[in-house]
Image: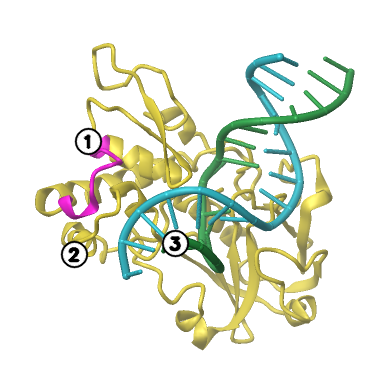
Chain colours: A yellow, B cyan, C green
Amino acid sequence: MPELPEVETVRRGLEDHIVGKRIIEAKAHRQNLRIPIPENFAARLTGCRFERLERRGKYILAYLDDSAVLIIHLGMSGRITLEGANQQPNRRHDHVVFRMEDGTVVTYNDPRRFGLMTLCRDVEVNKHRLLASMGPDPLGNEFNGPYLATRLKGKRTPIKAALLNQQIVAGLGNIYVCEALFDAGLSPKRSSHTVQGERAERLAATIRQVLDRALQAGGSSLRDYVQASGELGYFQHQFSVYGREGEPCPNCDCEFTVKRIVQSGRSTFYCAKRQR
DNA sequence: CGGCAAACCTGCGAGC
DNA sequence: TGCTCGCAGGTTTGCC
């Protein structure tokens, strides 16, 4: 799925096409996503106008004009596309469809169903169980070297796992953690508590930088991800290590190649020479 | 609490 | 061609 750059790209694409518009028909073809779609979901949404779209970590929050918020997560394989977009041929996994007053059709498709859509009152968004304990956004002001150092202090878990923890920083996933650790020259196996001071400063700055670059490229398109418009992101061409097992390290002019290891069940790609 | 494996679910590519 | 296996961008749960 979509990590922060992909989710933000989708958010922006949707924003341009649905904010200020009313849903004239909502359909939920399936109830069992990661969490069940609420009772009367379609009825509650029909007639609502989208006021604004925000993002928290990997969640999209769509504020409606009846004081409700539509909370969306794309899981691993979720997409939201607009009618006319270059859609996947398989409509089998179109779980939720909105028809807007101007004819725009918004489709949520998710083969693996690790994603979700749910509703909550706008005044309760910050207390919602999915969002309450989320850490700061890596692109916001709260996230910086001192913050990161504080959160990593005393932690024995590998730095890779800490950065995947959405309670520490919200929005990173497997790809961008691998890329950021490469750029920062830090081993994914390094114990979190050793990332302090200048190292934490450098890592925070590097995370921000890699996400900014990915955002500029419209995110990364591997198997599933497309922008709302159906266009592909192209940051995948700029990966230094992710998915590049066995290839030469782009920064070591020696025989070192990118290694793949498994950490807590997930692939980690890194260069053992550059990253210490 | 910390750390890890497994579970959730479907699709796709590699290898036989 | 067709089967099986492994792997996939996330998150939660349950076990030691």
Asked which quadrant contains residue A145, the reply is bottom left
| Magenta residue check for A188 | yes
Question: Is residue A60 at all visible to an observer of this figure?
Answer: no
What label does residue A185 carry, if any?
Answer: 1
Residue A196: x and y in percent read 14, 54
Mark before the other along the chain sequence, 1 or 2 = 2
Judge from the rendering whether residue A87 lies leftward or rightward of residue A146; answer left or right: right
Badge 2 sits on which subunit?
A
Residue at image position (23%, 49%) is A191
Frontmost residue, C2 versus A175: C2
Badge 3 sits on which subunit?
A
Residue flagged by tag 3: what amino acid is it? Answer: Gly
Q: Specify the principal SS of the magenta part.
A: loop
Mark before the other along the chain sequence, 2 or 3 = 3
Asked which quadrant contains residue C14, the reply is bottom right
Pointer 2 and pointer 3 on the same chain: yes
Which residue, given by chain and number where applicable, does mark 3 sit on?
A: A57
Residue A114: x and y in percent read 63, 57
Which residues are drawn in magenta? A183-195
Which residue, given by chain and number where applicable, does mark 2 sit on?
A: A150
Frontmost residue, A35 versus A21: A35
| Magenta residue check for A104 | no
Frontmost residue, A226 versus A126: A126
Closer to the observer: label 3 or label 1?
1
Q: CA distance from mark 3 to mark 1?
A: 24 Å
What is the quadrant of the C terminus of chain A in the image?
Answer: top left
